[in-house]
C-alpha cells in the first residue's frame, strides 16, 4: 500500500496517533506530528512512498511537534525529535516542513554507517550514475531538479549513499529542496513541476520542495555504479568551462563532502579511492541553467 | 515498576544468559530505541557480538548494532588520538596528568571501555600545575568556552575543574580537573593520594590512569555526586563492568571498603554497590554491602525516599519506559547533588539564577 492509497483522514489519524509508518529509500520511518503543514507536505510530496504495517521494522522514530509551554502563544515554534533526542534548536512553526526534511537528513547521516554518505546530488540515466557534490550556492540542487525533468532519474538531491558492502550508490529519492531564485528558475524550466508550500525566511533563505514523480526517480532497491563526478560551480556571467579534475583532488573534495568519513576511517578511505578510480571527474563552471544542462550533456555523451 | 527491556537485557548479560535469546522473536527495535536513548547502543551491540548471536539477528535491526559498533570504534580511535595530542602538549612542560572517566577506560582498554560513547576528554593535573596546564593548552588550540563571568567564577571558586576547554578545530571538549570532587563540598579532599597509586602508562612517562580501585571510586563519586542522570544507566553499567572485572575476590572487596574510608568516599561507594546490585544484579556479597552501609555517614534524606528517586532516575528517558515521577526524581536528585555540593547560602542564589536563565531559554548547567 502507498501513502496515496490512504485518504486524508486516515493519513492525519496516523500522523497524530501512533505515527505514520512509511518507507523512504532503504529506510523505515515513523512520523508523528500534529502540524497540518507537515500532513499536507507528506500527502503531496511522498504519495509513492510505501506505507508500512505495524510489523515492519522502523529505523527512525520521528516526532515533529510544536514546542509546548507559554512560548506556544507568544512565538510558536517546532522542534524535531529523533526518538526523544533533539539535535536542533526549535525553529519557527512556519518552517515545520523544513525542520522535518532537515531532521530526517540528520537521522540518515548520523546513523546509517552501512553507507559512506557524501553530500551530493545523484542522478542516473541508462544505468550510469552522475554525482554532483557541491557546497550551498554551487547550484547542485537546481541542476539536479532540472535533470530529473530532462530524462535523468533521481537518487537524491542531497546525499549519495555509497554502500559499504558492494560499493554501489543506493537511492533515497525525496522531494528536491530548492532555494530562493532556483525556485523560479525551475518553475520556468518545467511548467509541470509540482511544489509543496513555500517556507519563507529559513537560515538558508526561502525554500520550496519539488515533487519528484515515481517515473522520474530510481526504484529504492536499485543500486547503481557512478560513472561521472562533476563539481558544479555557478557563477553569473562567466564562460562555461569544463576542466578535468585529477583523481587526487577529486578524492580530497569527496572526503570533505562526506558526512561520516571519520566514522568509517580506513574503510572510508578505501571506498573513496575505489569510487574515484571508476569515475570521470570534472570541475564545471557555468553561467546559467541552459548552459549547465548543455555542459552535462557534453560531459556524459563524450567517448572516453 | 514495569520491567524495562534494556535493564533486563543488561541483567541477563551479567548472568551470562544472552545466548538464550531467541533472535527471531526478540523485540530488537525496542532494545535499539531504548539503548540508543540511554547512550548504550554500542555496548549492547558489543555484548551481542561477544555472546556470538549478533549474526543471527534479522538484517534490519542487526544493521543498527553493526553501525553502533562502527561508531564506538571511531570514538575510541578519536579519543586515543586526542590523548596522544594532549600528551605532546603537556609533556613539553613536564606536566603529569591522569586520564579520567571514559578516556581512561578507553586508554587502558578495560571492561568499561566496551562500547563506551562519549565526546569529552577528562584529565586531572596536580593543583600547582593547573595554571601552567591551562596556559599551555590554550596556546595549543584548546580555547576557553565563552562562559559569562558568573559561570567562570562558579567553576574556578567552587569546582574541581576549570570551565571546559574546546579545541578550536576539532570541537572536542576537554575537562581539566585538579581533583575529583568539588572543593566547595569537600575542601580537604586528599587528591595527592590518588597520585600515589596511579598507574603509569607504558612508554609514556607522565601519563597515568587511576588505580583500579580508585577508578571505581571515582566513577561512583561522579555518578552519585554530580546529579546528572541523563546518562545514569550508562554510568551504572560502567560501574557494574568494572566491579566485575576488578573486584571479585574477598581481599579486593576489603581493600575497596578501606580505600573509600581513606578518601572519605564511603557514601558514594555505598550507593554504587547498592544500586549496581539492585538494578544490574552485580554480584556484591551481602556482608560487603552491609559493611559499606555501616561505614557511611547518613545522608539528609531517608534511604527509602532515595531508593525510589534513584530507581526512577536510572530508567532510560524513553517513551516506552516512562515511569511516573522520573522527571521529578531527576530534578530532586539534581537539587540533592547541589545540596551536598555547596552550603545553602551559596546554593539558593545559584539555583535562583539558574532557574531564571532557564526560563529565559538559555543553556544552563
Image (spheres, coloured by chain):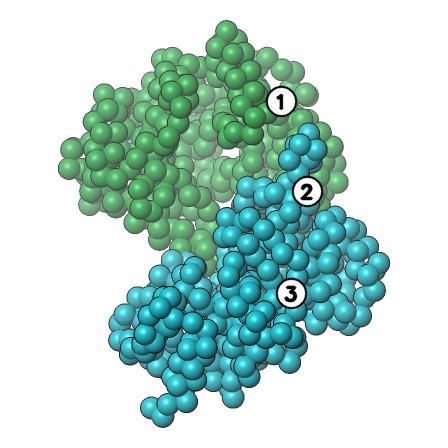
Residue at 46% x, 47% y: name it: B117
Report the residue marked by disc 2. Answer: A66
Toward which corner of the image does residue B129 lie, by quadrant?
A: top left
Q: Secondary structure at mark 2?
A: strand
Of badges 2 and 1, the one in the foreground is 2
Disc nearer the start of the sequence (3/2): 2
**Labels 2 and 1 positioned on one and the same chain:** no
Task: Give the chain ID for the green colour.
Answer: B
Task: Give the chain ID for the cyan colour.
Answer: A
Report the residue marked by disc 3. Answer: A195
Report the residue marked by disc 1. Answer: B332
User: Which residue extends farthest bottom?
Assistant: A303
Give whichever of B3, A250 is nearer the camera.
Answer: A250
In-image side of A252 versus B303 (left or right): left
Q: Are marks 3 and 2 in contact (CB under 8 Å)?
A: no
Question: Number of marks in the image?
Answer: 3
Callout 1: residue from which chain? B
Residue at 52% x, 77% y: name it: A147
Callout 3: residue from which chain? A
Residue B296 in view: no
Mark 2 nearby-residue class (10 Å; few <14, some 14–19, many ≥20): many
Q: Secondary structure at mark 1?
A: helix
Amino acid at each position: 500500500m502507498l501513502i496515496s492509497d490512504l485518504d486524508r483522514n486516515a493519513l492525519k489519524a496516523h500522523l497524530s496517533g501512533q505515527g505514520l509508518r512509511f518507507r523512504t529509500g532503504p529506510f523505515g520511518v515513523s512520523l508523528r506530528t500534529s502540524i497540518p503543514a507537515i500532513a499536507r507536505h507528506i500527502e503531496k510530496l511522498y504519495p509513492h512512498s510505501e506505507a508500512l504495517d505495524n510489523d515492519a521494522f522502523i529505523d527512525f522514530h520521528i516526532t515533529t511537534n510544536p514546542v509546548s509551554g507559554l512560548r506556544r502563544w507568544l512565538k510558536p515554534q517546532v522542534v524535531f525529535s529523533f526518538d526523544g533526542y533533539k539535535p536542533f534548536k526549535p525553529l519557527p512553526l512556519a518552517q515545520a516542513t523544513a525542520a522535518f526534511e532537515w531532521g530526517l537528513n540528520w537521522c540518515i547521516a548520523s546513523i546509517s554507517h552501512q553507507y559512506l554518505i557524501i553530500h551530493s546530488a545523484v542522478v542516473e540515466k541508462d544505468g550510469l550514475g552522475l554525482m554532483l557534490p557541491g557546497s550551498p550556492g554551487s547550484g547542485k540542487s537546481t541542476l539536479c531538479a532540472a535533470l530529473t525533468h530532462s530524462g535523468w532519474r533521481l537518487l537524491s538531491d542531497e546525499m549519495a549513499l555509497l554502500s559499504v558492502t558492494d560499493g554501489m550508490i543506493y537511492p533515497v529519492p525525496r522531494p528536491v529542496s530548492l532555494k530562493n531564485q532556483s525556485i523560479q528558475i525551475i518553475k520556468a524550466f518545467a511548467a509541470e513541476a509540482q511544489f509543496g508550500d513555500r517556507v519563507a525566511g529559513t537560515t538558508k533563505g526561502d525554500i520550496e520542495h519539488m515533487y519528484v514523480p515515481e517515473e522520474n526517480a530510481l526504484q529504492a532497491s536499485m543500486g547503481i555504479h557512478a560513472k561521472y563526478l562533476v563539481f558544479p560551480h555557478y557563477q553569473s556571467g562567466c564562460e562555461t568551462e569544463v576542466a578535468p579534475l585529477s583523481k587526487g583532488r577529486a578524492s580530497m573534495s569527496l572526503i570533505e563532502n562526506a558526512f561520516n568519513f571519520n566514522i568509517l576511517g580506513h574503510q572510508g578511505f578505501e571506498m573513496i579511492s575505489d569510487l574515484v578510480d571508476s569515475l570521470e571527474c570534472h570541475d564545471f563552471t557555468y553561467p546559467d541553467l541552459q548552459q549547465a544542462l548543455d555542459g552535462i550533456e557534453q560531459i556524459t555523451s563524450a567517448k572516453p | 515498576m514495569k520491567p524495562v527491556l534494556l535493564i533486563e537485557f543488561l541483567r541477563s548479560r551479567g548472568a551470562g544468559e544472552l545466548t538464550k535469546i531467541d533472535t527471531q522473536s526478540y523485540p530488537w527495535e525496542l532494545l535499539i530505541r531504548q539503548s540508543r536513548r540511554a547512550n548504550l547502543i554500542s555496548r549492547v551491540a558489543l555484548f551481542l557480538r561477544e555472546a556470538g548471536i549478533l549474526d543471527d539477528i534479522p538484517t534490519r535491526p542487526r544493521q543498527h548494532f553493526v553501525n553502533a559498533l562502527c561508531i564506538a570504534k571511531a570514538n575510541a580511535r578519536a579519543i586515543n588520538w586526542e590523548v596522544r595530542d594532549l600528551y605532546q602538549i603537556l609533556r613539553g612542560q613536564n606536566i603529569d596528568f591522569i586520564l579520567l572517566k571514559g578516556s581512561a577506560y578507553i586508554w587502558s582498554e578495560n571492561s568499561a571501555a566496551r562500547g563506551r560513547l562519549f565526546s569529552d576528554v577528562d584529565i586531572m593535573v596536580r593543583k600547582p600545575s593547573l595554571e601552567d596546564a591551562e596556559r599551555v593548552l590554550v596556546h595549543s588550540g584548546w580555547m576557553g568556552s565563552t562562559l559569562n563571568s558568573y559561570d567562570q567564577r562558579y567553576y574556578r571558586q567552587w569546582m574541581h575543574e576549570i570551565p571546559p576547554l574546546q579545541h578550536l578545530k576539532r570541537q572536542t571538549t576537554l575537562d581539566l580537573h585538579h581533583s575529583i570532587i568539588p572543593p566547595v563540598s569537600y575542601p580537604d579532599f586528599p587528591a595527592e593520594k590518588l597520585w600515589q597509586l596511579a598507574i603509569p602508562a607504558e612508554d609514556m612517562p607522565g601519563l597515568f590512569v587511576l588505580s583500579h580501585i580508585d577508578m571505581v571510586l571515582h566513577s561512583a563519586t561522579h555518578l552519585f555526586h554530580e546529579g546528572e542522570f541523563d546518562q545514569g544507566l550508562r554510568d551504572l553499567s560502567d560501574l557494574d563492568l568494572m566491579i566485575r572485572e576488578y573486584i571479585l575476590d574477598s581481599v579486593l572487596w576489603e581493600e575497596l571498603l578501606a580505600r573509600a574510608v581513606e578518601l572519605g568516599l564511603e557514601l558514594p561507594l555505598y550507593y554504587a554497590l547498592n544500586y549496581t546490585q539492585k538494578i544490574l544484579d552485580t554480584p556484591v556479597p551481602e556482608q560487603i554491602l552491609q559493611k559499606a552501609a555501616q561505614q557511611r555517614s547518613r545522608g539528609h534524606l531517608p534511604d527509602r525516599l532515595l531508593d525510589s528517586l534513584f530507581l526512577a532516575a536510572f530508567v532510560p528517558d524513553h517513551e516506552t519506559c516512562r515511569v511516573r515521577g522520573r522527571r521529578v526524581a531527576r530534578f530532586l536528585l539534581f537539587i540533592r547533588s547541589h545540596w551536598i555540593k555547596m552550603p545553602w547560602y551559596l546554593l539558593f542564589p545559584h539555583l535562583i539564577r539558574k532557574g531564571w536563565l532557564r526560563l529565559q531559554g538559555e543553556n544552563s548547567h
